[in-house]
Image (spheres, grey):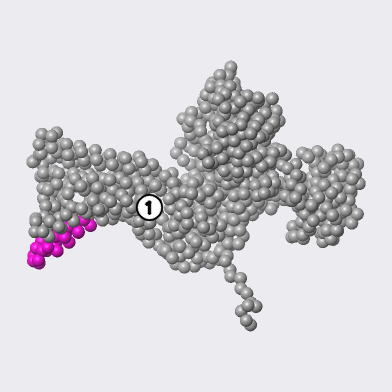
Amino acid sequence: MAIDPHGTAPPGPVIETTALTKRYPGDVTALDGLTVSVAPGITGLVGANGAGKSTLIKILMGLLPPTKGQARVLGLDCQRAGERVRSLVGYMPEHDCLPPDVTATEFVTHMGRMSGLPAVAARERAAEALRHVGLHEERYRQIGTYSTGMKQRVKLAQALAGDPRLLLLDEPTNGLDPAGRGAMLELIARIGAEFGISVVVASHLLGEIERICDHLAAIEAGRLLRSDTISSITRASQVLLVEVADGTARLADELGRQGLDPRPAGRGLLVPIAGDGTCDVIRDAVAGLGLSLARLEQRRHRVEELFRADEDAECPPAAVSASGGRHVA
Amino acid sequence: MTGIELRGVSRWYGNVVAVNDITMTVGPGVTGLLGPNGAGKSTLLHMVAGFLQPSRGQVTLGGEPAWRNPGLYRKAGIVTERESAYPFLTGREFVRAAACLHELADPVAATRRAIGLVDMVGPMDRRIATYSKGMRQRIRVAAALVHDPEVLLLDEPFNGMDPRQRLHMMDLLGRLGGQGRTILFSSHILEEVEQLSGTIQVMVAGRLAASGDFRAIRRLMTSRPHVFLVRSGDDRRLGAALIGRPAVSGVELTRGGLQVSASDYGAFAAEIARLTRDEGIRLRELLPADESLESVFSYLVSS
Amino acid sequence: MSPETTGVIHDLGYQRYDGGRLGRMQIVRTLYWYSLRAAFGLGRGARAKILPVGLFALMCAPAVVEAVIVARGGTRAVPYDTYVFPLRVVVMTIFVAAQAPELVSKDRRCRVLPLYFARPLHRGDYPLAKFAALTVACLAMIDVPLVLLYAGTISSLHSGSAIWGETRALLPGLLIGALWSVTLTVVGLAIASFSGRRAYTTGAIAVFFFLSWSLAQFLVTVGGRGPVTQPTLAGLVSPFTILDGVRLWLGGTATGPLPAVGRYGPAYGLSLLVLLVVPALVLAARYRKEDAA
């Protein structure tokens, strides 16, 4: 069921694929029966290697027909309603894609007009988009003079100018230094939270995904590895981490005497939670021994564990699929 | 004696000073070279790799000068930022070529071992043109490891790698560092640097801003109160008790818990357990909020 | 309440766009205008204008000179349908060799095409808009001097029939100009679409046009033994002479490089068709590949 682009956000998934498969000549399988449903909000798309990720993006934008299966974006069939999908989606590519000899204002305005905005609206929305991404006087200089961080912002602005329902951001922090990354991530979080636009962030950096995403879709070998909310993936584990400045061994002994089961880990101890009072026991032990407490943390699970968990079960990169073709590892 | 040493090293291009009077020592283990874009990290790495001559000062690797010293490459392996691997070769051929160029006694075995280290045994007989970015990166690391170097220099080594490849590479670098090799790598991904090793060299605008373990560096920033997030059974009461302590300079009730600024880190850490016990307040979590590498780095860059 | 005691915080948050959106064809038209302006360096700074404007001035020069001659009572030497043929060849070759890459290779080089394809356009819309823009640009280069020539001539005429005669002579010239524009554009864009490096594509276009023209001239004069008076197929080696052959076939005067076309007329016609269709297909194909995105 198609949505009305001027209405409020529809309740259904923003992206939905069913057994999506794409095989290229040369027997290369980029997507192999991918079935995933992406809810509104900020979703991290992780794990997919280069070919799988770009293939998925092209299919979602209606630029490439799948070999098998179906894909829907915002309720529209990507194959049949590709043009409408593209008018509702803002895409920020991973690679450099900006002409060096125009100003940001000119470029974003032009791209706004290419999205179908009338001239005046395009100019206004371009100015607003550049303001939201944080480009001020720089916008009147030629893009060739920009730093990587500024270029990434221009890329984001051109995706925003057309008033999209969904943003597809491909490695938005690529090439940015830590300060730039922090700023970009903050911007994306703000867009997802305040602008009412659903965002899909394709990234290899699990820390980023944990930081700003609500959901996660992990793809591997062209298939869905896991799709879940970040809060459930990073749910608290039943282990406490204790770090003291000195006397870790003494603390371990004392906790052992108290019936807990501490194990050394890095600079501290991991203590399984035996009940509600475990943290009290630890507190009292630290206080009783006169130790300096540097950290007491209930460990949370991490997205990273998805990729460590089945490391042993993982097939070697040259795995042969049922059809005898190669997976692009 | 395989450390990297820089003494008074500068490098300028006309009026632009890319590296400004840096004296640093990098010992065995894994060290991260950090800095904002344009800080001079690549220039520094190129000088350490012997690709660039310092305008002033000396760069030595294991006691030998880095510049104009081909013998250096017997001890050092280098992985540059730009992707450079011949697309028409297979992975195996590429690493074997490196092995032969190093005049190793048994290039075939060395090749097989290096490729095994980076977990590229499966695709090693496919042409590099068919590799993904992460795979190309891994094969280049294999070529840099084929001669079993004592020193490894990497410029943004995780670029393009997917999570599994990253974890694998981090394990590999951690292992190699644990074997006593000297590994210096530059990266913007601070959470990975933090996980691999806490030892960092931070460059800002061509100068060396800080060296060493980042936690120790944080403790040195005594003018900045340490920020903690405390979750307790009674945040408000705990806050009231804490603000009365001289070690605490500020307390804020937030949705996530009690945010405490400790002007005296040592004193605060020493008394928090006792205080909560004596007040009968359950201490659920005590989390340093600005001790991460990310925080330390942003403090260094902004100061 | 006085204004000093109240205050307002305006909402500067993100606004949705509720206005109308233009359809696909209108977007294509916008891209067409944008490219047409780029073909003459408009909106790009002074440097980009030098070459196109300079070439245009060069093309107009004979028209201005002729107008002065006619005003002084002399007779017109420059016809409408061939104008000054060698000047046209040189100017248009340089123009297309410089501007086709400007329109097409630049975008490929900076990899902006994925952004175009991510928009509500069809794959063929981008090359279509570029084709329309460069064709109109070439049309301006070729036909505006003709119109200037016409205006300069009729300003010295006084009888209605003379003016009507001039007009009847002008119209085929404009048509030939249109044919030139379409042909040179489609060939130039097809070549330019192969690479993002402007140096290569500019060179390739220039070399193709100049070399084929030189070869045609050489063959038409039978290796320097003197101009040929018989119809010859030698003109098929160059787009310029193919165009001239078609012009002759359609009834033009022998004022161009070819002496006559005789029974070879259809051959020239067919060649022109091939010269239009094949590059057009190549151009469309270059933007249909998924790798362009």
Q: Secondary structure at mark 1?
A: helix
Q: Residues within 10 Å of mark 1 (few under 14, many from 20)?
A: many
**Residue at position x 50%, y 65% from top?**
C17
Left or right: residue B279 compared with residue C45: right
The chain under label 1 reads C
Q: Quadrant of residue B49?
A: top right
Name the spot of residue C80 as percent of width and height, x first: 15, 54
Find residue B266 and report its horizontal and vertical position in percent.
82, 47
Would you identify the image quadrant in which residue C6 lies?
Answer: bottom right
Residue type for callout 1: Tyr
The part of the chain drawn in magenta is C144-171
Q: Which residue is mark 1?
A: C126
Residue at 17% in and 57% down: C149
Q: Is residue A106 magenta?
A: no
Q: Nearer the viewer, residue A307 or C117?
A: C117
Instruction: Determine whether, in the image, residue C104 is placed left or right of residue A39.
Output: left
